[in-house]
């Protein structure tokens, strides 16, 4: 099986690896892995005979699923699992007919599909964590280096007052750390799904009864199944408790939001007239005859795209919480593609952001030049404070609201100050508040949270 | 090329034909068709030599595009067109080297991609029109037949008062006609995109100049290009004027909304306890051992899924209107997949709705039985009016607010009425207002709008 | 009654007039007007006696509604109408006890509330049309004046190639005209709501029967009611056919989208480093000691705010289409505030945009200076075409992809051209394609559509 | 000051208390409290003289803010703080002219407004916690009592298999506990906002310098300010790090989603034909002559309304993360009303849900009757398992897929079972899996998490 999601219309994740890792073939593989985990857990709990596991696992590894048949099954039965089970059972029956009865024993489509989606999510969250960590590393380095590099801060888009590129970068870093923390918490909290047709696990209990399994066999199976998949055991089935989807959506909204903030700032700063950073692309990228770039806008484009698309997908997931019945007609079904797309978009964004930040270079001279552009305007706060003793608070404030007119009248007042004080007043570097303290705070957080990202050995989604 | 969007996680459109008709291979074909149309229009306008068209058209028909290379191109340059042009040019050069210079002459990715998306949209809207018409036909027949079939109307979910199944169906029909009208208007209004890198068509003008073409060659090219594609000529380039996307989104929100309304009503009416309609599936559908169905919930599921997912995609399209610059970094890119998904969801929904309505059968006996369930409650309005002269308006109203307590006291008042009046009062069929007039109004609209849907001979998206 | 929506947290419409015109007091007034229109229409149709209208109209004009009591009523009964009818009936009874029975005769809350909302919408759409027209006028003037003013076009945010400020402005104008056209179409198409408790108008028919009214009295009432309100008569009741809300939402998404596009472009162009336009605020605005502005960012802020908030409210309206039952528990109720907020946001945006465009001044010198910033880069398309005959197409293209490196090598090639051709090549003004033709096309459209906006004499929402 | 948000169009929170607690007057009060806290913290840190605090606090308590002037200020300066500071300063100056210079010393609108919004959020979250706890208590009681009450589970809306009302209720409880946990975590984590005009706190540092305060005065001020407000001190200013809004939005999406799930299930179960629960309203509620209710649909309506509206507001908040500049023009401003509306909707929903669950009564007889409706269908899983040894797995499964046809053929097979086994097989109570175990798990969680909700003594938003 090869990737089937090429991403031709998805610049946010095309060719980042997220396409392959979350494509239909990997999904099919994850569904098969869940069926094997179910059989394994049932054997451990005494619900099916131990000898039946190997033939099922072998068949799952060997069998070549007909994806078009699965799609037909989706239309006929509402999900891809029924058809997949038929194909898997056929394969098992062809090599070990006695084991065929133990495929998907007492199982329900939702158990299989939800669990498989969590496997995909787990892998994607680890990937995102990894790329956010690369991104955080690059930003931490920039923040440290440029702790004292002055630049203008903009509010409502006009120039406001000086800040430092270090603090600008630390702000991005703070966002990335916020996102990473949420992704990590979540990554350790994804639940396996096991509830049977209605959330009572009744069919599993019947099967256990028929097999003469111990009275707590079903609970044992729940525990073993989750362990087998490397997922958390859910307190109760979550067919009708869609909290995990809200949590995933929220963490990923935070992720593409954080990276989107980075992107729009970089986009503004790389404008030809501003030129405060250069965003160098990898070699061979960004070729368009009509617009030879001063910098490579493709990373920014990819991040913007993800930040625009993901919240809409999150909305679909949020809409699946308040739905009727033990299992909803449409509420559940609407989740699938929205969840996959959230994972793809956030994965693609993290991968692109890691490359963007690796090639991001500030241009301190331009930052200084831009600071000087609006004359004393960016220092008005400071001048107001300095002048207040001379001319009175209200008069000082008033002066600077009158936009420009102030500049000429200013001279007389300033004559009242000695020349060194004057120089200090007009040096933006002296008016960056406690920016350096703040940078250090974020860097300290970065260090504290920088354990190497766990790369779990999940039993799953490697495409075969 | 084969379909690449299998729909495994998309029950709203899996295996409905929308998967194939809007898949990546058809997109690639549409992109090639647009390149051919560009060359043709340029030849007509004297911008490129006439002899160059045939080699380009032949190469487009013959060439086998490497989709993985396109995906790489998406990541490198932000869109699939640059890589496609490279591949097409290579193909042209291999058979007619002199024509290679005339591929994508003065062209811009956005011209090609936006035009190709409109071709896909045009085909999809025609398909949706066709399926909405089937759906409307089935509903019109039901509305006519069941003009006098009484059933209970529900407000805020409790029983309110009688209505007819004819009016219920006419309401669905009215929605479907509203959606179809919007789809048809739009289908005749989709614009070709031609603006060059910045919306001035400057490069096309350069090329025209080099070729010694007439002074209005570029305008001629604009007209010929739109005609060639069967699309409307845009007054000015719409790179920065995304009105067409808002219009498409709005029409399709209306489409899945209308069909979603049908679905949730059918879903309620098919509940085992209510049983007022049966939604029969096509043979061989709906097989799940855990829930042998009284009816097939899969159509309803598909429609609910589409109605839940589409507005979120519409949001992404709406977000692409207020974006900066002549061509936006991310605003434009976020549209592509959202637009395709809107088209797929609405196409899938229309196809499923056509089948659902074809198999929809009312159960008049259950409707009558349900009407009787809440005793005189559903007739409280009528009784209030009848009793008012006897007991006073306020007293009559008050009685029915007291929920149930009214029932026993009612008898005495009713003794004051003669027996035929009493029968009439208690017959729900006599309390359906002007439902029949309203049904006729909608049926008249249906007839007036029932020209056979135009099946245009578009030059495009048949997958080859 | 005074305004109750102060807009302290709503900079998109605070103090624009939209606060007052769409506030709770005006809503209450509109509800009363609808009750009077209902009585008038019923009298015309013979359903209630003609003498009963005047006492009801007088009471509606005189009565002072207790808004807190209405709010209690909303919680108790789900909507404000029941409590309003109680208060109105009390007032009528106090002056003309016999007329009290004819208040809200056979009426249903939804008929009254939906009709009142359409009255508010009609007024708001007229206001929006008016302000969009002011905005269009200002933009048309700018487009005409600056037809030949060159500036740089930006794609994906880097400089791409020259355009004109006239075309930039014409693009904004095209968007505003698109929005205005949708608003106008809609403004003439808003339906009155009249369906009774379940959409059959049964209670109205009962009342007509009791009154010995003609057999078609209910249809007559429908027509008279719509006329009385200056709204369109709906073919059938729209309690369950929420098309009008989708249409309003779509037109207003287009409105704030169009104005939002204007805002983000202006925001970019007013950045201190770019400075291509000045957005002068009204006197006395924009005072903040920390950031004395080069220009007034408040209009842009208001427009951005509206463009960000409105699509979310539209989503709520879209979600009200696919809801169960004759009248939905929650689907309907969720519409009200979302609809009002859409109207407020679009009204506020149009008012702010009219002022923004009135004070918008281009700075042609800065546009020229910015064009020069990136050297020949913005002319790369043109140079590529000019050089192709000398060095071959591929070589020419390649040169400009290599970012910067091209510049030095360029000189030799250019030596091959005569000096006047060279000057022409390097003059951006000569490379603006057919921008002037396009400007004229939009101006012609503007003229064709510039009938003075109709200011209808609606019977309604003047706050008293 | 009185409430100004009456909720006439907001049935989700009208008259629940959320209207008053989140109205404009309380907001104004919170803004004043933040100004007082700022002065207090600055005095503690030595930035302003200690004697200046009391006059400011007294003036804030005494002064009567002109709300219309604030609204004008919103339009002129973009936010309500500038005008509020003017009014407060005027008041201070009138009693203690020397203290006037110390009002809002070095302050920025965003510090004040964001902090005030967090105060409102903190109070609202506590209220929501309180109401969710009432709700959880009622559900826990129901779950315990009805641990063994059988009812039918519905999947995709058709009957599937038996479950218990206890498990149904435990599912709702699990959702409510999930929501409450998120609300509680968040309630302890809301940050004060203090960053100055650009996030460097430069103006505060200037003031500290002028006052000869200690070198770490600004950090001291940050700590004291947060303590004063009962909020968390933020690591760095969050003007450009909007994580807190994403967290609030996510927790509240979960809240109205959980309560919305409860509502749609109750709505389905209270349908006249199903009748499995009765949702009794408070006395005097739900009066509409046209639909005397079997139950009160108003709570369900309110919850549905909230669940439909809140995610859209959350979207606006999510959209404020990826915005440009130190402080965004429109990104920030779009948050305010969206945040308030999220808080109102969730507060109103929690209040309504607490009342709904307090009056919720199951009807076990109807549950049993409904279970019997579809004959053996709901037991098909169990019968399949029981029959498998007799007729083979595949044959058994096939039988039940053939919808209905199975029933007649079933008899012969069942003859092979002894009569007691047969009774057991046909008793739905025996086929509820491990529902009782699952109920106990949720109840154990409920007990573990049932500390009495903290009612903090916040210094703030009591309306005066």
Image (cartoon, coloured by chain):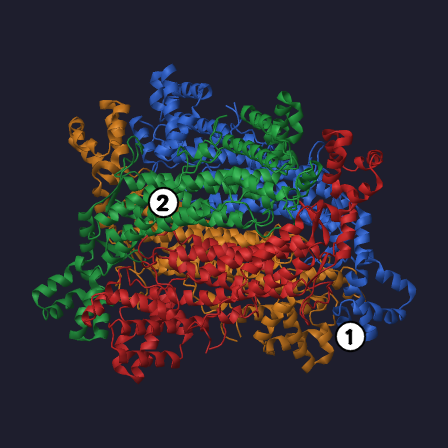
Chain colours: A red, B orange, C blue, D green
Residue found farthest to the top: C95
In the displayed structure, does residue A187 sit left or right of residue A133? Answer: left
Looking at the picture, does residue D238 appear above or below residue A396? below
- Chain label for disc 2: B
Identify the chain of the residue marked 1, using the numbered disc in the image. Answer: C
Dot 1 crowding, Cα within 10 Å, few <14, some 14–19, many 20+: few
According to the picture, the residue beneath numbered tag 2 turns out to be B439
Q: Is residue D416 above or below residue C161?
A: below
SS at circle 1: helix
Residue C333, horizontal then vertical, whole percent: 41, 40
Give the percent coordinates (x, y) of residue C149: 80, 50
> How many numbered tags mark residues here?
2
**Residue at image mark 1:** C395
CB within 8 Å, label 2 to label 1: no
Mark 2 or mark 1, whichever is nearer to me: 1
- Quadrant for residue D441, please give it: bottom left
Callout 2: helix, strand or loop? helix
Q: Which mark is residue B301?
A: none
Task: Left or right? Give the position of B146 relative to B259.
Answer: left
């Amino acid at each position: 099986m090869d990737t089937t999601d090429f991403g031709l219309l998805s610049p946010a994740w095309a060719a980042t690896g997220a396409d392959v890792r979350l494509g239909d073939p990997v999904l099919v593989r994850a569904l098969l892995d869940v069926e094997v985990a179910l059989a394994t857990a049932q054997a451990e709990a005494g619900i099916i005979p131990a000898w039946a596991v190997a033939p099922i696992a072998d068949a799952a590894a060997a069998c070549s699923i007909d994806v078009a048949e699965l799609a037909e099954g989706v239309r006929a039965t509402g999900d891809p699992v029924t058809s997949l089970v038929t194909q898997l059972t056929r394969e098992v029956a062809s090599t070990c007919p006695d084991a065929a009865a133990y495929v998907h024993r007492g199982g329900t489509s939702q158990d299989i599909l939800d669990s498989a989606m969590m496997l995909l999510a787990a892998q994607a969250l680890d990937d995102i964590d990894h790329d956010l960590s690369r991104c955080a590393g690059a930003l931490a380095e920039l923040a440290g280096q440029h702790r004292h590099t002055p630049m203008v801060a903009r509010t409502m888009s006009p120039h406001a007052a000086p800040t430092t590129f270090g603090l600008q970068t630390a702000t991005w870093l703070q966002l990335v750390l916020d996102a990473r923390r949420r992704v990590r918490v979540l990554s350790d909290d994804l639940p396996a799904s096991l509830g049977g047709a209605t959330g009572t696990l009744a069919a599993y209990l019947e099967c256990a009864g028929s097999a003469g399994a111990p009275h707590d066999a079903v609970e044992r199976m729940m525990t073993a199944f989750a362990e087998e998949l490397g997922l958390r055991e859910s307190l109760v089935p979550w067919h009708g408790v869609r909290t995990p989807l809200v949590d995933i959506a929220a963490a990923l909204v935070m992720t593409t939001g954080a990276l989107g903030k980075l992107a729009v700032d970089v986009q503004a700063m790389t404008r030809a007239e501003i030129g405060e950073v250069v965003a160098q692309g990898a070699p061979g990228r960004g070729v368009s005859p009509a617009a030879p770039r001063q910098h490579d806008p493709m990373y920014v484009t990819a991040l913007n795209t993800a930040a625009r698309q993901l919240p809409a997908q999150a909305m679909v997931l949020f809409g699946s919480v308040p739905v009727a019945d033990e299992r909803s007609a449409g509420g559940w079904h609407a989740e699938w593609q929205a969840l996959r797309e959230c994972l793809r978009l956030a994965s693609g964004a993290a991968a692109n952001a890691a490359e963007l930040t690796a090639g991001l270079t500030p241009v301190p001279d331009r930052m200084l030049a831009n600071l000087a552009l609006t004359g004393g305007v960016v220092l008005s706060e400071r001048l107001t404070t300095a002048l207040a003793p001379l001319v009175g608070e209200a008069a000082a404030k008033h002066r600077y609201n009158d936009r420009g007119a102030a500049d000429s009248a200013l001279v007389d007042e300033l004559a009242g100050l000695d020349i060194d004080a004057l120089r200090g007043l007009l040096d933006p570097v002296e008016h960056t508040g406690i920016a350096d303290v703040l940078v250090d705070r974020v860097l300290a957080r970065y260090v504290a949270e920088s354990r190497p990202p766990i790369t779990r050995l999940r039993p799953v989604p490697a495409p075969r």
